[in-house]
Amino acid sequence: MTRILLGRKAVLTDIQLVRDLVIIVSGIVVTVAAIIVAVTMTSIYRKANDILKSTKAAAVRLEALAIIAGDELCKPMLEVAGFMQGIAVGIREIGKLFKKGE
């Protein structure tokens, strides 16, 4: 750009220079901001992905634990409860027989 020192033309050239500098600086700032946002989003995605994988693994382990607890604890307890209920019904029926016999 040449600078013309004749009154108004010199001012216009300075304004054009400032405009060009503002455009260049704005472009650099926007580019740097976009790179920073991209790096930040990638970092957040990786951390969230690790947390998600860990949560899925914990859910699988919890499901396996619930299945084992159901198989190993609940079934024997139900069998014991059924046995006790059977004994209670048997005692009740024997009690009815003795009451009728008197």
Image: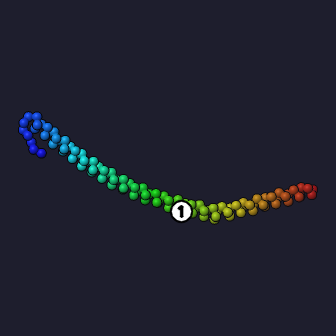
What crowding class fits label 1: few (fewer than 14 Cα within 10 Å), some (14-19), or many (20 or more)?
few
Q: In which quadrant is the N terminus drawn?
A: top left
Looking at the image, which residue is at 57% across and 63% down?
64
Vertical relation: 102 (above or below) 19: below
Identify which residue is drawn at 36% across, 53% down: 41
* Residue at the extreme top: 7
Which image quarter: residue 7?
top left
The residue shown at (13%, 40%) is: 13
Give the residue number, with chain letter if any, for mark 1: 61
Residue in the image at 56% along x and 60% along y? 63
**Coloring scheme used:** rainbow
56 relative position to 43: left or right:
right
Percent across and percent down for residue 83 are 75, 62
Across and down, in percent, residue 94 comes to 85, 59
> Seen in the image, is 86 located left or right of residue 58?
right
10 is higher (above) or lower (below) than 77: above
Instruction: Using residue 61 as the reference point, say whether residue 47 is left or right of it.
Output: left
Q: Nearer the viewer, residue 61 or 83?
A: 61
Amino acid type indicated by mark 1:
Arg
Q: Position of residue 67 (x, y in %)?
A: 60, 62
Q: How many marks?
A: 1
**In this rendering, position of residue 33 left or right of residue 17:** right
Instruction: Using the image as rendered, state which of residue 5 and residue 36 is in the foreground.
Output: 5
Q: Quadrant of the C terminus?
A: bottom right
Task: Locate residue 19: give its quadrant.
Answer: top left
Tell which residue pokes out farthest to the left in this image: 5
Q: SS at mark 1?
A: helix
| 68 vs 43, nearest the viewer | 43
Front residue (pair 78, 48): 48
Residue 44: image location, x then y, percent: 38, 54
